[in-house]
Image (spheres, grey):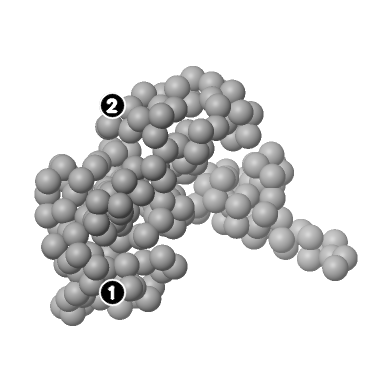
């Protein structure tokens, strides 16, 4: 479909506004655009995202690629960041217990599943440590938390779904790996599940 000049201008404005709220990487992914084009459009409209937003989104993307076995040089090229940034993310992840080169996220998850564990990933913005038990989540009405308790702790079945949710969160937080008993599926997000008696088995501070 060929867009008019006005339609192209409106689309560029939408891309810039989305980037200002969620970050360059998220906007590029959402509109299926290159990082360079998205960044250019954002600057044209004076909607460049804050440094905190870009660092937050970029960190999750870099970690995902590291866990997938992508080299630091290739990550630096694809994400348009300096190699030192990749090294920084890797060091922080290794300090939190992640192992690169010999184990991927899929391997870790599969080992837990083969051991009979129900596995879920959750992004939290409060202090947690390995061994903590998380209480059940609650139903939300828009931005308001209700008193209606869910049958378990909300989590995501996959790293991809968790990372996509986490990249829109403000500030820093923690990636938490949970195990427990299956308590059904959620309805608010794709790959959302409920885990009862959820226990933290791994934490990555971000």
- Residue 11: give its label: none
Within 10 Å of disc 2 (Cα), the crowding (few <14, some 14-19, many 20+) is few
Q: Mark 2 and mark 1 in contact (Cβ < 8 Å)?
A: no
Nearer to us in this view, 10 or 60: 60
Q: Which residue is drawn at 50% across and 38% down?
A: 68
In which quarter of the view is residue 52 placed?
top left
Where residue 201 appears, as percent x and y from the top left, is: 20, 45
Q: Upstream in the sequence, badge 1 or badge 2?
A: 2
Residue placed furthest toward the top: 84
Where residue 134 appears, as percent x and y from the top left, is: 15, 57
143 displayed left or right of 51? left
- Residue 184: give its label: 1
In which quarter of the view is residue 73 placed?
top right
* Image label count: 2
The quarter of the rendered structure image containing the N terminus is: bottom right
Within 10 Å of disc 1 (Cα), the crowding (few <14, some 14-19, many 20+) is some
Q: Which residue is drawn at 65% across and 42% down?
A: 35
């Amino acid at each position: 479909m060929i867009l008019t000049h006005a339609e192209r201008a409106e689309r560029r404005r939408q891309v810039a506004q989305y980037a200002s709220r969620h970050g360059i990487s998220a906007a590029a992914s959402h509109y299926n655009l290159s990082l360079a084009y998205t960044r250019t459009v954002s600057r044209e409209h004076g909607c460049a995202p804050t440094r905190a937003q870009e660092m937050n989104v970029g960190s999750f993307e870099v970690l995902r690629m590291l866990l997938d076995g992508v080299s630091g040089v290739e990550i630096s090229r694809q994400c348009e960041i300096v190699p030192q940034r990749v090294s920084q993310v890797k060091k922080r992840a290794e300090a939190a217990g992640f192992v690169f080169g010999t184990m991927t996220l899929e391997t870790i998850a599969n080992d837990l599943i083969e051991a009979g564990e129900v596995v879920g990933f959750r992004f939290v913005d409060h202090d947690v440590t390995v061994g903590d038990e998380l209480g059940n989540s609650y139903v939300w009405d828009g931005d308001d938390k209700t008193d209606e308790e869910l049958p378990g702790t909300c989590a995501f079945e996959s790293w991809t779904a968790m990372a996509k949710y986490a990249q829109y969160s403000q500030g820093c937080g923690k990636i938490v790996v949970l195990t427990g008993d299956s308590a059904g599926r959620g309805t608010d997000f794709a790959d959302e599940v409920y885990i009862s008696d959820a226990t933290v088995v791994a934490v990555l501070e971000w």
